[in-house]
Every structure is written in structure tokens, then in C-alpha cells.
Image (cartoon, rainbow, N blue to C red):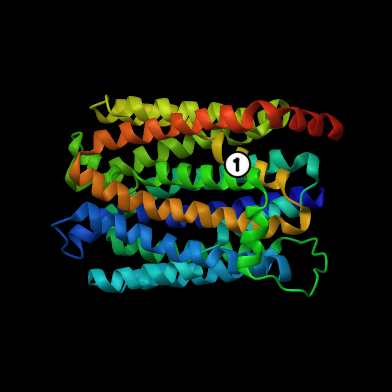
Amino acid sequence: MELWKRNLYILWIGLFLNHMSYTLSVPFFPLFLNQDLGIESGLEVWAGVSISISFLISGLCAPFWGSLADRYGSKLMLFRSGVGLALAHLANFFVYDPITFIMVRIFQGLMAGFSPASITFVGTNTPEKHVGYALGVISTSTAAGSIIGPLAGGVLSQWVGLRGCFIASAIITLISALIVLGVKEIHRRRSTERTSVIQDVKRAASNPKLLRIFGLIMLVSTSVLILEPLITIYVVHLGGSASRATLSSGIVFSAVGAATVIMGSRWGRIGGRIGYSRTLFIGLIGGGLGNLLQMFVHNLIGFGLLRFSYGLFFAAVFPALNALIIQHVDHNFRGRAVSLSQSANQFGIVVGPLLGGILGGWIGIPYVFLLTGIALLAAAWSVRGAMLFKPIVHEQHAASSDT
């Protein structure tokens, strides 16, 4: 087996387990805050803060970890993050008040970085002509984790409670850290010259295409995470049993992940043929329309089916954005470029849950779907105007030269 394929398979398993352990418990934070920590007033806001704070810290730290990955390799960063996240999940088991819970979430943000390190590893250790396909495949690992995690968490919580889910998350995350030790990195000796985060930001800022991609990543991640603290609450509003809310919401959360597994690698191949900007445009259109339609569905089955349909199109977005980053930066800057993109992603994830928690309690959850749909359609329009037609010639020439 070719080395890049072997690495891809190992990373797929590791990232799948890592993301499964995350979604085993995080989607049910609103219930944990309510049932175990006694939060009743302002539950949406508390849920938003608990999710956002970890990603805020992670976003601030991402360029630092990316710089270390460029210097010492992504494999070391994968192991560091896996072990640290396992400790963070374990610490949640011992939390009995909301302030301590927030402190543990801050620690989890410091230890984050498993996913960007995986993407960097794939981008820098895969032959150019296979990068789009590989990034599409690796995106299905997190999607598969998003299927199994909420379902397993919903079932497991019925047996051992939400605290038991934290123990399971810690064990699975530690296993993911051990698995990725099996990858073999083509580690070219980097220059001993160290660049600061400010220098990396300046270098990225000199690339207008890269800045537009970062802006889109922040907008898209905001649109995804704006619903994170609301879905479980919304499932109960749609008629789901409060006592079985973890299982019902787990199924709904899994719908998007299932769709991404089905289409993730296919969108990667399609992007290699028609251009990643075009697949990005299609994904944003599908995501925007899917969000708009969700505000008109008022039963659990219809809502779940619509979430699945939305995921079939939205699966194109992140692989296309990651491929565009790899395409528009020099090889020796890819690790730092991906880390900066993860900072944009993390800041979007910070804004999303906070905004969702505030808006969900203020104007109602259905109107959050409306605003998200409009934002994604506006992003699609910006892609069409600024990135789609002019760069496509370059992308198609690049694809044909590879063949």
C-alpha cells in the first residue's frame, strides 16, 4: 500500500474516534447543565457559553500549535492533543457546578488541535493530485463520528447517565491518540528560523484569496454551530419526550453526519473535476436552502429528514475550503495556513453558540434557521462573484496538468 493511503486510513480511524468521543457528550450539554448542574434560567445562554469558550481558547492557540507542527511535525501534535483532550473529558466527570464546568472547557480548548493537525498531515503528506480526494475522505471521518457519537451518547446516557458519557469519551479519545502513533510522516527538515504568529498572519494577509477563504470558513462554522446549543431544546419543542431527549436529539444530530459520510469523498472527487470553487458554491446554496426550509417543519421525522438532505449538499463545503487553502499557499506554509484557517473556524464556532443561545431565547429557534439560511445564500453569492469563474480556469488547468 502506498504510504499516503496507509496514513490516510490510520488518520481516518483516529479522527473518527476522536470526533465520536466529542459528540458522545457535547450535544447534550444543555441537558447536563439543567439536570446535573441545576441551571434553569438562561439555559440557552449557558449552553452557548460552555460550547463557545473552549473554541475561543482553541482558536487563540491554533497558530501556536500550527507553528510547532511545521517545526516538529504533525504527528507529535496529534498525540499531544489526543492525550490532553482525554484528560479534559475525564475532568468533566468530577464537575458539580457551572463555574468549574467552564474552567474545564477552557482547559479542553488549550488541548484542542487534533482535527487541524490531521488535516495538515494529510495536506502535507499526500501527492498533489490526490489532495482533494484525501481531504474529502478525511472529512467523512468526522462526519462518521458525528453519526455514531450522538447515537451512542443518547443510548449510553440512558444506562449510565451523562457523567458516564464523559468517562467513555475520555477512554475513546485516549485510544485515538494511541492509534495515530502508527502514521509515518514525511518530515522534511524545516528551517530553524522561527516565525511568530504575527508574521504568519501578515503572510496570510498578503494573499487576498486566502483571506476570502478564511472569511468564508468563519461564516460557515458560525452557521453550523449557531444551532449546537439549540437542537436538543428544539427537539423537545417539536414533541420529543424530555426524558428521552438525548436519544431523539442524537438521531437528529446524526442525520447530517450520515449525509456527509455518503457525500464527503464524492464531493472531493467532483471538486477535482469541476473545480473546488464550484463545489463550494453548490454546497453553500444547498446549505442555505436547507436551513430556510427547516423553519417550516414542525415534526421530528420531517425535521430529521430535512437535516439529512441539508447535509448531502453541505458536505461539499469544508473539503472544498480546505482544498482551496492547500491550492493557494506554498508547501512550506501549509501547516500554518491550515492552523490559521482553524483559528477562523474556531472563532466562528465561538460566535455561533453564543449567538444561537442569545437569539434562540430572544426571537425563537425557527428564526435562527431563517437568519442562517440567508447568511449561507449570501456567502454563495459572494463565491459566485469573487471566486467562482475567474479562478476556475486555473483550477481546471491544474487538474488537467496532474493527469
* Circle 1 residue: 321
76 lies left or right of 126:
left
State the image coordinates of residue 163 (x, y, percent, origin top left): 30, 64
Q: Is residue 52 visible?
A: yes
Query: What residue sits 47% from the left and 55% below the top?
Result: 346
| Residue located 25% across and 33% down the image | 366
Query: As drawn, is 279 to the left or to the right of 347?
Result: right
| Residue at 61% over, 67% down | 197
Is 32 on the left-hand or right-hand side of 320?
left
> Residue at the spot x=66%, y=67% of the render?
67
- Residue 160, given in percent of the width and then of the height, sits at 29, 60
Q: Mark 1, residues whose alpha carbon is within 10 Å: few (<14), some, or many (≥20)?
A: many
Left or right side of 391 for 344: left
Q: Quadrant of residue 92?
A: bottom left
Q: Position of residue 229 (x, y in %)?
A: 30, 49
* Of 23 and 224, the residue lying toward us: 224
x, y percentage for residue 130?
76, 40
* Extreme residue in the left direction: 41
Number of numbered discs:
1
The C terminus lies in quadrant: top right
The amino acid type found where label 1 is placed reads: Leu
Classify 64 as above or below 286: below
Residue 313 seen in the current view: no
Disc 1 element: helix
